[in-house]
Image (tube, rainbow, N blue to C red):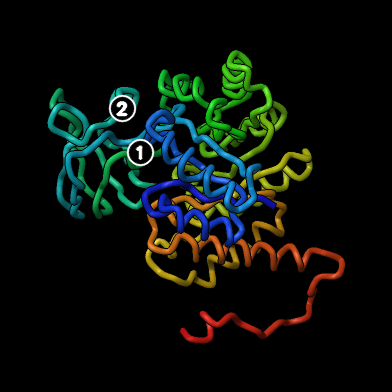
Amino acid sequence: MEFYATLGPACSAPQTLDGLFRAGMTGTRLNLSHVTLADSRPLLEEGFRAAARRAGREDAHLILDLQGPELRVGALERPVPLVQGERTLLGGEEGIPIPPAAWEAVRPGDRIALDDSALLLEGEERSDAGLVCRVLRGGTLRSRKSLAILGVQVDAPALTDQDRANLDLAGELGTTHILQPFVRGRADVEELRRALDQRGLAGVKIMAKIENRRGVERLDEILEAADQICIARGDLGNAIPLWELPGLQKRIARRCREAGKPFCLVTQLLWSMERRPVPTRAEVCDIYNGVLDGADSLMLTGETAAGDYPVQAMEYLVKTARAALDDLSPEGAGDSPNFQSDDQEKTR
């Protein structure tokens, strides 16, 4: 089974990368919505690849997560406090910067989810100056956080110019997988496949992210076109009522098993561990059940990229998944309870 971390400031130090490999990490994701591949060369060559060699894991996967049609707010001079009940401006010269495709699509009355729905706005009045929005769910907005106009399909290209520039360097830096965001059907996957073939990267695996309604509706054709599926629960949870997400995850997992297609599970697997050294019981149960549902890989995001406990998060991810795999094996624990807990749990 594969265990992936996301690269970021919290895990860029050599000792942290070494700790992630010791904990069981088998590869890493680089989110190209925040950085370019060229700018990340030192982190990959002198950081990740060097740590992989020290760990004897020269075969460690490097996964590039492209921008694609994903929507994000732009760069902010400083974090923006959004206070519930107050107004803020979206778009225009003075408002929170948003992509042109989002500005073309958003209208008064729309609800706009930011940062995987941690923040929620409602459009009230639109003018050349921007869209005045009321803050329904407040918090602090930081640069490059996700944006979704709930219930609205925004037209955007499958690959951006920046995606193509990143792909130009992908082979040189040892890329093994591409995470393709917001896949809407076979055509999106085939466009990426052509771009890889043109660059001599036919061996790079395409992991199609299912994170919108169109991707769910066209899952069967995406299963045929992609090498792997990624159940990306962040934006998928924006596209549907949140309480419907567990059932949808189960149905996608079942279709992957039936089609013999590997799938990865990602988003908030250990979200509380961004700030806590021990996960919630619900989180470890979520991981365990994901493995029982057939996940071939598990991916941490903010837990390792920006969290306070990246190595501990990887340790819990790997230990929980291996416990599930043990229980799935013919000689596994089965129904026999194991009341031993680790030292960290005993001292809580």
Residue 95 rendering spot, x and y as whole percentages = 16, 34
Residue 204 rendering spot, x and y as whole percentages = 64, 29
Whether residue 126 is visible, yes or no, is no
Mark 1 belongs to which amino acid? Leu
Are the two marked residues, 2 and 1, in contact with CB atoms closer than 8 angstroms? yes
Q: Residues within 10 Å of mark 2 (few under 14, many from 20)?
A: some
Q: In the image, what residue occupies the spot 17% across and 39% down?
A: 77
Taking 144 as reference, is 217 left or right? right
Residue 7 badge: none
Whether residue 201 is visible, yes or no, is yes
Count of marks placed on residues: 2
Q: Is residue 303 above or below residue 158?
A: below
Q: Nearer the viewer, residue 277 or 42?
A: 42
Q: In the image, what residue occupies the spot 68% across and 57% down?
A: 291
First in sequence, mark 2 or 1: give its number. Answer: 2
Q: Give the labeled residue for mark 1.
A: 147
Q: In the image, what residue occupies the spot 53% across and 31% down?
A: 173
Q: Nearer the viewer, residue 8 or 238?
A: 8
**Residue 133 image-quadrant placement:** top left
Residue 251 rendering spot, x and y as whole percentages = 67, 47
Taking 336 as reference, is 76 left or right? left
Q: Give the labeled residue for mark 2.
A: 99
Q: In the image, what residue occupies the spot 44% across and 20% down?
A: 165
Q: CA distance from mark 2 to mark 1?
A: 9 Å
Q: Nearer the viewer, residue 22 or 289?
A: 22
Mark 2 belongs to which amino acid? Pro
SS class, disc 2? loop
Q: Residues within 10 Å of mark 1 (few under 14, many from 20)?
A: many
> Which residue appears farthest toward the front when viewing the image?
54
